[in-house]
Image (spheres, rainbow, N blue to C red):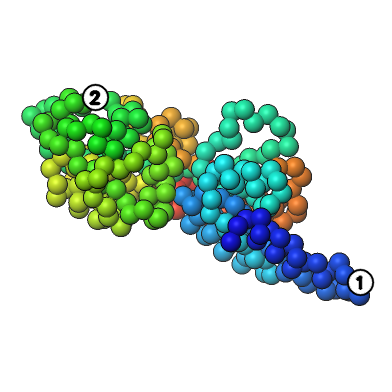
């Protein structure tokens, strides 16, 4: 169901409070709904925040509508959602002062590889985000092209439609199409096992995932850790950003304050996310 359609249904559900004969008591008891249009890469985080928020605010319901960052912002601009939840900063050309954004958490993607890619003391060239994309797409055929061993690059990716895959796609420039030979797995443990079992393999892990015996490759000579993610120095950094347009209703203000407050940040600090406070 589309965001606009759901927004219409939510608005329609509240009309009874304003109809003739509706009492003030009924209006006060009317359930409150919060609609958030957002990127599927952070759906699990926003849903967890929503569950905890409802415990503190009985009678509130939260609906999450998965969509692209651009669609979420458009819905917010057109009043079709209460909040947008996106995985990047606001576009640089956003100058309208009615836009408001609040960072809730960071996350990142770590490139890992089979130990054999550096056999014989080979030193890899620093990986840039575009290079990671070329490894995934098959444009770079062997590790030798990057100064490594003469092994064919064998990408291992998460299954399409999983939160891990969404987070991977969100931080890679251009969202490269995976090579036809790419292997897919369902979780981080299987990712590590597949990379270790396949000479030349490379994969991607989230923050907090144990790389096991694989080689963790820095990106542009920056290692992924809490400090580099919070500062944005790590090139494959993602965000969880709440965005509004215009004056925020009290329920929206309450949710934003909760997400950035102690209780919300305790949730935002669970891997693969990093709390900002």
- Image quarter in which the N terminus is found: bottom right
Crowd around label 1: few <14 · some 14–19 · many ≥20 (10 Å):
few
In the rendered image, which quarter is residue 163 located in? bottom left
Which is nearer the N-term, disc 1 or disc 2? 1
122 horizontally vs 7: left or right: left
State which mark lies toward you, 1 or 2: 1
Secondary structure at numbered mark 2: loop
Query: Is 139 rendered above or below residue 50?
Result: above
Instruction: Please provide percent x and percent y for residue 270.
Output: 44, 53
Q: Nearer the viewer, residue 60 or 75?
A: 75
> Which residue ends up furthest to the left in the rendered image?
120
Q: Is residue 73 above or below residue 35?
A: above
From this viewpoint, is residue 246 visible?
A: yes
The Cα atoms of the two marked residues, 1 and 2, are separated by 72 Å
Quadrant, the C terminus: top right
Q: Is residue 48 left or right of residue 192?
A: right
At x 41% / y 34%, what residue is drawn?
173
Give the labeled residue for mark 2: 125
Q: Which residue is mark 1?
A: 20
Circle on res. 133: none
User: Please, is residue 200 above or below residue 191 in the view?
Assistant: above
Say which residue appears at 28% left-offset and 25% top-offset: 126
Left or right placement of residue 184 versus residue 75 in this view: left
Do callouts 1 and 2 mark residues in contact (Cβ within 8 Å)?
no
Residue 266 visible within the image: no
Residue 266, position in %: x, y? 51, 54
């Amino acid at each position: 169901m589309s965001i606009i359609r759901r927004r219409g249904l939510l608005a329609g559900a509240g009309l009874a409070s304003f109809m003739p004969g509706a009492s003030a008591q009924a209006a006060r008891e009317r359930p409150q709904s919060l609609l958030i249009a957002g990127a599927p890469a952070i759906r699990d985080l926003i849903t967890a925040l929503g569950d905890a928020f409802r415990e503190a605010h009985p009678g509130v319901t939260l609906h999450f509508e998965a969509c692209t960052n651009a669609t979420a912002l458009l819905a917010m601009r057109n009043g079709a959602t209460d909040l947008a939840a996106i995985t990047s900063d606001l576009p640089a050309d956003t100058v309208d002062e009615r836009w408001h954004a609040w960072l809730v958490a960071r996350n990142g993607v770590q490139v890992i590889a089979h130990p054999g890619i550096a056999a014989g003391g080979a030193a890899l060239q620093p990986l840039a985000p575009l290079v990671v994309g070329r490894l995934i797409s098959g444009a770079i055929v062997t590790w030798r092209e990057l100064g490594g061993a003469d092994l064919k690059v064998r990408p291992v990716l998460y299954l399409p439609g999983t939160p891990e895959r969404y987070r991977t796609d969100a931080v890679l420039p251009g969202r490269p199409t995976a090579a036809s030979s790419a292997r897919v797995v369902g979780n981080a443990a299987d990712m590590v096992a597949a990379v270790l079992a396949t000479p030349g393999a490379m994969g991607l892990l989230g923050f907090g995932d144990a790389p096991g015996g694989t080689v963790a490759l820095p990106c542009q000579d920056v290692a992924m850790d809490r400090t580099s993610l919070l500062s944005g120095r790590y090139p494959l950094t993602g965000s969880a950003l709440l965005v509004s347009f215009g004056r925020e209703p009290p329920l929206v203000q309450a949710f934003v304050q909760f997400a950035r407050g102690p209780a919300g940040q305790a949730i935002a600090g669970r891997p693969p996310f990093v709390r900002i406070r």
